[in-house]
Image: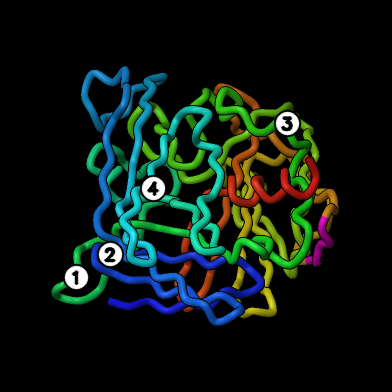
Amino acid sequence: MKIKRHAKSTLTAVEMVHGDTLEFFLRNGRCLSVELLDTKAEIIHTTLKEPGKEEPGATTVYRFWAEFRIDGVNVRLEREVGTQASFYQPWEFGGVHIWLDAVDAIFEFMQETHAPCRLQENCGHDAPSRRHARLALQEASLRICPELVHPWCPLPLGGLNIEDCYRGEDCWLGAYDGASAHGGLDINHPKGTPLYAPIHLDDQFLYNSTEMGNNNNRWRGIRQWDDHTTWILTTCHMTHLTVPEHSPLQAGMHYAEGAGVWVGDAEHTHFGFAVLDHGELIRLDPWILFWQMYQDFA
């Protein structure tokens, strides 16, 4: 199947099936052709007694890759998850940044019990049950969005550290308890750490809270961009909001105190990121936002 997308002011998120070709048009009219050929994943190291079965404190490091034909050239993009390499740089081809966010092959040995992160189900009789690869793309001369991305929390000097992702495991898709892909990015910091709006937000509110009887305070911020894309940002474990709910926020506004409710083994904030575009909600690695923050403010 051919998928057509045009570079716009915000990054493009797309999920593909083997054999799909993405035609990504740059602003100058040039088209980058990206055909998905194959995807695979494998465990590099694990302390699990039984692969795929969670064990408290277990660790798993794995790799995944996707084979593409990009503008007629066969290319293999490979990622490692659960090490410092989780915080990767995008590839650049033909003036386009490409983030290889996920492949569904990791769920041959991983579960999805620690927040949604798996690729979407497919429709149609002849289609595979799940899509195979998830990408984010943006014209390399453009930012991921048309405004500076303010630090969401105080940025660790020199970049994010895998050791500070809860127990060293809870990066995006990291192996929680050795066997469940983590649906967010955890950053360890003390109770009371300020959280700031990374971008202007049209609306924001708690969708779970201890006052509602939930075991956590979970917040959602929404931005509708002029290019008709909507971004949804989430944070969990805040002690309290510092602004009224459903009030718009300017980038950099202090909206909550983090890391203080139901944090488990380490005080931390859980960050989430999703893009609603072409009628599909696609969850992405919050690292992409932090990558831009480091570009803008480090």
Q: Residue furthest left?
A: 126
Q: Which residue is mark 1?
A: 127
| Kind of residue at disc 1 | Ala
Q: Position of residue 296 (x, y in %)?
A: 77, 50
| Residue depicted at 52% across the width and 62% down the height | 137
Q: Which residue is mark 3?
A: 156
| Residue depicted at 35% across the width and 32% down the height | 62
| Kind of residue at disc 4 | Leu
Secondary structure of the residue carrying numbered label 1: loop
Viewport quadrant of the N terminus: bottom left
Do tag 1 and tag 2 residues touch (Cβ < 8 Å)?
A: yes
Secondary structure of the residue carrying numbered label 3: loop
Q: Which residue is mark 4?
A: 77
Quadrant position of residue 267:
top right
| Kind of residue at disc 2 | Val
Secondary structure of the residue carrying numbered label 2: loop
Q: Which residues are magenta?
A: 247-251
N-terminal of the pair, mark 1 or mark 2, is: 2
Secondary structure of the residue carrying numbered label 4: strand
- What is the magenta segment's predominant secondary structure? loop
Do tag 4 and tag 1 residues touch (Cβ < 8 Å)?
A: no
